[in-house]
Image: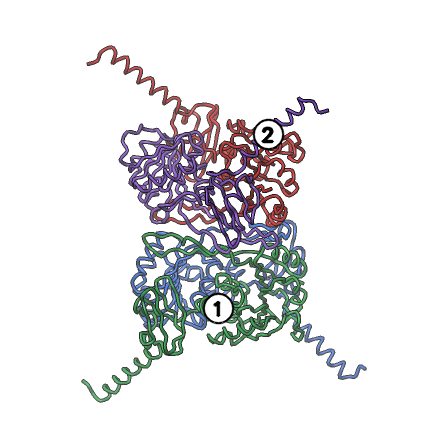
Chain colours: A green, B blue, C purple, D red
Amino acid sequence: MSSPVCIILHFVLYFTIKIIKFTMAFKEGDWILLVWKDKKYLKQLSKGFNLSVKGSTLKLEDILNREKGEHINGFYLFSPTLEDILLLGFKRKTQILYPKDSFYVAFKLDIKDKKVLEFGTGSGTMTAVLSQLAQEVWTFEVVKEFYENAIKNWNRFNLCSNVRAFNKDFIEEDTLEEEYFDACFVDVREPWLYLDKLHTRLKKGAPCCFLLPTTNQVSMLLKALEKGFGNVEVLEILHRHYKVNPDRLRPEDRMVAHTGYLVFCRKTT
Amino acid sequence: MSSPVCIILHFVLYFTIKIIKFTMAFKEGDWILLVWKDKKYLKQLSKGFNLSVKGSTLKLEDILNREKGEHINGFYLFSPTLEDILLLGFKRKTQILYPKDSFYVAFKLDIKDKKVLEFGTGSGTMTAVLSQLAQEVWTFEVVKEFYENAIKNWNRFNLCSNVRAFNKDFIEEDTLEEEYFDACFVDVREPWLYLDKLHTRLKKGAPCCFLLPTTNQVSMLLKALEKGFGNVEVLEILHRHYKVNPDRLRPEDRMVAHTGYLVFCRKTT
Amino acid sequence: MSSPVCIILHFVLYFTIKIIKFTMAFKEGDWILLVWKDKKYLKQLSKGFNLSVKGSTLKLEDILNREKGEHINGFYLFSPTLEDILLLGFKRKTQILYPKDSFYVAFKLDIKDKKVLEFGTGSGTMTAVLSQLAQEVWTFEVVKEFYENAIKNWNRFNLCSNVRAFNKDFIEEDTLEEEYFDACFVDVREPWLYLDKLHTRLKKGAPCCFLLPTTNQVSMLLKALEKGFGNVEVLEILHRHYKVNPDRLRPEDRMVAHTGYLVFCRKTT
Amino acid sequence: MSSPVCIILHFVLYFTIKIIKFTMAFKEGDWILLVWKDKKYLKQLSKGFNLSVKGSTLKLEDILNREKGEHINGFYLFSPTLEDILLLGFKRKTQILYPKDSFYVAFKLDIKDKKVLEFGTGSGTMTAVLSQLAQEVWTFEVVKEFYENAIKNWNRFNLCSNVRAFNKDFIEEDTLEEEYFDACFVDVREPWLYLDKLHTRLKKGAPCCFLLPTTNQVSMLLKALEKGFGNVEVLEILHRHYKVNPDRLRPEDRMVAHTGYLVFCRKTT
């Protein structure tokens, strides 16, 4: 029986769904990940938006009010993940630390709700990853151009609200408390020059990670770590991707063979 | 000049440091990671504690009130990290997902402050990793023995307070809201049997990850994902460890060659 | 004292050295490997020869009568090795088997001074490698264009004098003796269709190798090999190259991740 | 119709087959490869021979007059290949060069019918591989125990008839002709000490290979090769084996991660 109450409830429900759908749908200003076959594009939706790939075309009006996961003109529409943002959205002024390495490092440093030190900031990709797990991240970058670029990267994607960034060489910082940090990540060319200073700023037993591209640097660092650090590990991470054809499953023809060596250790007394 | 105020302040400072030192020091009941050369031991400190490795011995009284990072009788003393706990502290009733894979997966699923679904729970290692990033994790395990073991693992190390665990096959769960979860991790033998159900429970565009040990399973899953899922990626992760001798740097002789294939995708409409 | 005999001996020696030097030097018609930094060029010396790389130029007259190993205008001059010829000199109508795989396979098949069967010939790279160790190689290729290309490849570089090539599907060959071959190498899409025939032509215990690009094919073949073959091994070979800077030693950024799976086995009764 | 000629021919054929079968069959003194599931045993057949694996047993009389490829009591019988001999038959007094590396190196050095220099000999595995392709191999080993062991290894398996072995440090050899060798393989701890001498003994443009286990040695060698050698390549070879279950195809759990770095170059003027 369609009483007035029923009718009202019906309308309420109808508009609630409309509103939810509207909230879930893509709007101007949103960042969107567009996937066309095995190609990915990270774009911000704005007037005049237009993407064309081998004859498939998308315009702003094709996307507005569409929902995540929809398939239009050969493109899938998704919200970008952190990985998409780091790989496709961050502007790079330096060699970056890739998700392949940074995702592993962040957990390995055991930083959940802890205080983390980073230097140098570079393009800010590692900072963004550390920031998701840590309570706070302090990061130092001596090159002004890099420092400013990193901050822009974070702001464009509303990341790193718990990060304090400094345009300064970590070695020159002298107002920090002793034994303040629970862990650190170091990505500079000559990390052995920073070990004494680093030692004073870390809590006892703090896990550390250093990224180094060459074996010569790894040897240099290992020698320097013999004093004041222990439980040293060196490793490299390789990701091997496969073609996603179920009837012809096989690895991709080529892969990334090297980004850097990861040196892990813990502060000792 | 040593005024009475000065003396009082001096005492306050002295005892504050004592108290902090006491708080930082190892006490009975604590879990401790003991590192002897390249061997690691995760132990809980209790009466009668005794560890002996090739002639080096540690007793409870050697450790009590010692600080993290100290070196005693050839052993380094550390608090265990999450990785140490997963590798050395969790009891295994099943093949586990190793940090090499789980640390990468958790970030790749983009679950910071989100709702995550997992099945099957297994020994609970992946749950513990997901739990650190996610807002809440719901996990399903059909085998009672595994379910109970996972819960014991979490409780022993005070992990997973934001996890809801069910001793039930995910397929039989029927009270869950539609489109509740932002992401999922699936570790069961025949994931293709769960895809229809899984599709109803995931939000639009939700990232998913499946772990599969064999290529035959990957082929089966890829075929099944063609309906309702897109942006599929298959990859495997290899870690290569090095001997930490600075003058003779070289990889370890042997390495883990395979744990499983990781299949990533996103829910589509 | 300079007697007439001495003078004559002197002249003899002088001309002998001249002749040897002339024999060792590059002449028109020779194949030459030119190495410019990390780039390699395989060329045949002929009138009008001219090679230009980023401003460095070589002409025929720069090279004639120069010796191997000389360095001219930024180029090193070498005789090409078998590997250089296979990688740079052979024309490809098909996916080829690379030295990374073929060099290992040839020795693994234990074919020194033995009779080897190959099908399909493809571009003839594997044939050229087998031919260096074996007494004789019989090779079958059903596609006329491939068959003719392979023969041209061998003739250009004076390779494969002990090879008998057939423009025919191996399955259709019916004049061969039973148990004639000591070993075989098989590179066709559906090798399982050939196993019965292959079994009759191989000596007892003969080692076999199959190249297959996909895991699905490997599974199919493994099932088929259960009858009539034993001691099965499956492997893949990865080569990782390094940048040759002594002060900054590190792997190349990218590498070949996959060519094919190698399945080895031996004929059983 | 059975004429006397027919009967005679019949007998001739009968005995010919008997003789061939007898020749093909295993006899006392033969080396045999026994394969039991994924285990391999290389044995010489002699009185009292007895092999027992998890309840499966083989005695001499089980094997005599059996043919290659036969399956008896769970064991396959095969003639050993060169790889089987190197891995299971050669006695090791030193770290050996594995087929994974040596099979590739031998072809890469382009030594078919050429003169090859090797030092040090070690256990003689590389010598055995070089010897199959080369015209002649000269090998130097300073440690008497290694030198004698290598010769014993070759003699046990009738290998290396074209090898001249010297119990001497290559640096001390002074009767060799200049520019005698077409190629060389070097496996000593400090190869840079030998480069001047080596240079005099190699033909112009000769390919060389050095095996080195550590990155520090590679850096040292690369620096030394800058004078007198060119076209330098550094690489490492990884083999990844699979479990041979067609329905559950997957890599082995563990693999060899490192044997050594291979440094290739060519003599320049």
Q: A45 or C51, which lies in front?
A: C51
Label 1, label 2: how far apart the Cα atoms are: 83 Å
Write down the chain letter for disc 2.
Answer: C
Where is mark 2, residue-wise? Answer: C15
User: Residue A73 location, x and y as percent?
Assistant: 30, 68
What is the quadrant of residue B1 in the picture?
A: bottom right
- Can you give x and y, in whole percent of width and height, for residue D51 in the image? 46, 31
Q: Residue furthest front?
A: C4
* Quarter the C terminus of chain C occupies: top left
Name the foreground residue: A46 vs B164.
Answer: A46
Task: From this view, report whether residue B236 is shown above or below residue C81.
Answer: below
- The amino acid type of the residue labelled 2 equals Phe
* Amino acid carrying mark 1 in the image: Gln
Q: Are marks 1 and 2 on the same chain?
A: no
Tell me: residue D131, above or below residue C40: above
For mark 1, give the secondary structure: helix
User: Does A48 sit above or below residue D265?
Assistant: below
Letter of the chain that mark 1 sits on in the rendering: B
**Residue C258, horizontal then vertical, whole percent:** 42, 50
Toward the viewer: B12 or B117?
B117
Asked if residue A143 lies left or right of residue C83, the reply is right
Nearer the observer: mark 1 or 2; the answer is 2
Q: Is residue C236 left or right of residue B229?
A: right
Residue at image point 62% right, 64% down: A205
**Tag 1–tag 2 contact (CB < 8 Å):** no
Report the disc number at residue B132: 1
**Mark 2 Cα within 10 Å, few/some/many (few <14, many 20+)?**
few
Q: Which residue occupies the extreme top position in the image? A: D4
Task: Identify the element where label 2 is drawn.
Answer: helix
Location of the N terminus of chain C (image quadrant):
top right
Left/right of residue A52 with respect to residue D88 in the rendered view: left
